[in-house]
Image (cartoon, rainbow, N blue to C red):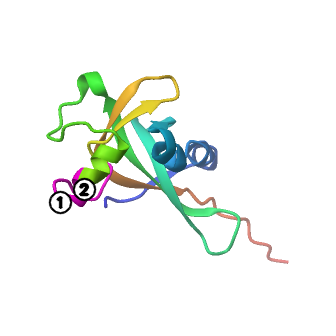
Amino acid sequence: MSSPIYVPEPKYREIDRANSCMSIIDHGTCKTVHCNNAEYVITGAMGSGGGGDWACIWGAKVVDLSVYNGELIPLKYNAHWDEVRAGNRERAYAGMLLVTKGKRQIVVEGPQVEFRKLEVGKQLTLF
């Protein structure tokens, strides 16, 4: 996995609200977010262990089906994972065909990325 993408708190909350893990499984639909001139689908998150917030959020870069030129044939969720189980694809989201909430067809193009919240320093109390 590449280096984490650090984002300010408001963007991190937007990314969190776009988590489409369950809707991808249930319906093949997703929300997307834009960050650093790219569009991402959010696929999961990992708890901090301290409760209340995520340690990181995972996603992958997506592109419109009409401009996708990757090596993998775009497949919907079940067909995609059938190919993974058969050993014909890596265990990842790359090549998965999704539909946005606005009915746009997109394809997961990139490997998994990790989003982390940019921590802002706290003022120390000296006295």
What residue type is disc 1 on? Gly
To which quarter of the image does residue 114 belong? bottom left
Residue 84 location in percent, x, y?
24, 56
Q: Is residue 37 visible?
A: no
Disc 2, SS: helix
What residue type is disc 2 on? Val
Residue drawn 27% across and 52% down?
82
Name the mark on residue 84.
Answer: 2
Whether 92 is among the magenta residues is: yes
Q: Are marks 1 and 2 in contact (CB under 8 Å)?
A: yes
Q: Quadrant of the C terminus?
A: bottom right
Residues 26 and 20: in front is: 26
Residue 53 location in percent, x, y?
65, 62
> Mark 1 highlights which residue?
87
Residue 120 location in percent, x, y?
63, 59
Disc 1, SS: loop
Kindly give the residue lying farthest to the right in the view shown: 127
Q: How many marks?
A: 2
Residue drawn 64% across and 63% down?
121
Residue 126 location in percent, x, y?
79, 76
Q: Which stretch appears magenta?
A: 83-93
- From mark 1 to mark 2, how far is it between C-alphas? 5 Å
Whether 12 is among the magenta residues is: no
* Predominant secondary structure, magenta span: loop
